[in-house]
Amino acid sequence: MSSNSVVQKRYFGTDGIRGKVGQGFITPEFILRLGFAVGRTFKQQSNRRPLILIGKDTRLSGYMFESALESGLSAAGADVALLGPMPTPAIAYLTRTFRASAGIVISASHNPHDDNGIKFFNEHGAKISNELELAIESEIDNAFKKIDSNALGRATRIADASGRYIEFCKGTFDRDLSMRGLRVALDCAHGATYHLAPDVFRELGAEVMTCGTEPDGFNINRNVGSTSMGALKKLVAEVRADFGIAYDGDGDRVMMMTNKGEIIDGDQILYILATQLGGDFQRVPGVVGTIMSNFGMEQALLERGIQFARANVGDRHVMETLQQKNWTLGGESSGHIVCLDKTTTGDGIIASLQVVKALIRGDRDLSDALQDLTMTPMETINVRFKEGQDPLESTAVKKAVKAAEVALGKTGRVLLRKSGTEPLVRVMVEGSDHKQVSDLARELADVVEASLSKNS
């Protein structure tokens, strides 16, 4: 698809439709129309009645949007199967196994509870195409068309969805292996993995200690999970865990922690999976990262004969590059890890299981598994901006970026980009000297903030 087609999208962003609850497109009225548009679109593309699965994370607003989607889809003549709170990758898996036309996720991932969003999977459990997003958009502003009551869609609830997904996750862990003797600390971010991940690890033999497993509709991602590792660090120390694992609110990201409290990010997880999963380097010909991936990780992979390719930030771009290269392993520093030999999308539980499998097979702990990896000093600072502001176009910001690049020389790089999921500018500096990197990142962030204040 041409870049012009992508620009024409009015509602879909880089990962579905997302925003503040009650604002913009994240209102019951719009979501009702969206459901009707989705139902009509899939009905037009098939000669059979569509079946659409709907799952959500633990945000209170998810119940409201679930009802709106269900009503819109049914009014368009599509059948609906409700999954309840489920991780995003679980919805991708169940969409495939139920031979559904599509899966819908009501979630804002790692964002706070007052955000929410809608994202879609196709019948293969992959993100829907730009073409399909445009087709849905073309239907959204159309008036509701009358439909006979005997043509309305039916709604059902899949009662055993959790059990199905737990068994699927366990099936990615070798049958000859057991976690018996391991003490694992899990942080589920008060999100969609709270009732699943602990059971997966317990049933595989681990002794499991948890935090972030008491969602109340408002506390998702609040000081817990993969974006806030303090709670897990405390738990790991208190229970003397062998390692810790933290997921984000919808379970498609994972970060890990050593028994000493050291954070293991997505780049380090990719390194472990690429180099030590069974010890056969030829089994992983290449890895896809992003423009944010650490240079030290890239160099370490290349030294071991493993190719590395960078994609733009976002799981859609990682997936596209994996498919182009015919590789199976890729991901982002934030912990979004894709193991295409196991599933069709980024999956925090499955990625963490593969790391544990590598550790058991190699009889190593997390620190040992990373002893040959030297990460390049990198600092990322997030700067929030308001709608309509574009600090990246500021003359002062551009001048500061050039000055930082000169200061780093050939030993480092600077990257400023807008987040695709939040109103943030991510200021990233990477180089050989940790203090210089940290100082330059802070200076650049200050310039960005000053530019925003000037234009507010």
Image (spheres, helix red, strand yellow):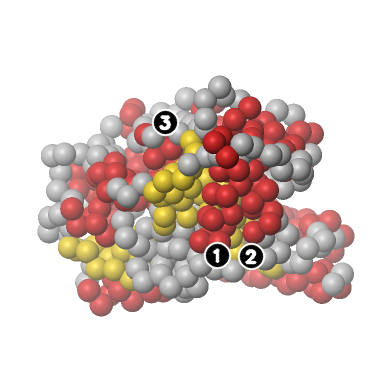
Cα gap from disc 1 to disc 2, whole angstroms: 7 Å
Residue 232 shown left or right of residue 362 in the figure: right
Can residue 24 be seen here? The reply is: yes
Give whichever of discs 1 and 2 has the lower sequence position: 2
Element at label 1: helix
Q: Mark 3 sits on what residue? A: 99
Q: Mark 1 sits on what residue? A: 61
Q: How busy is the neighbourhood of tag 3: few (under 14 within 10 Å), some, or many (20 plus)?
A: few
The residue at the point 52 percent across, 39 percent down is 153
Viewport quadrant of the C terminus: bottom right
The residue at the point 66 percent across, 70 percent down is 442
Q: Give the answer, above or below, for where 313 lies relative to 65.
A: above
Element at label 2: loop
Q: How busy is the neighbourhood of tag 2: few (under 14 within 10 Å), some, or many (20 plus)?
A: some
Mark 2–mark 3 contact, CB under 8 Å?
no
| x, y percent for residue 396 | 84, 64
Give whichever of discs 3 and 1 has the lower sequence position: 1
Q: Mark 2 sits on what residue? A: 21
Give whichever of discs 2 and 3 has the lower sequence position: 2
Q: Which of 173 and 197 is in front in this view?
A: 197
Q: Which numbered circle lies on residue 127?
A: none
Mark 1–mark 2 contact, CB under 8 Å?
yes
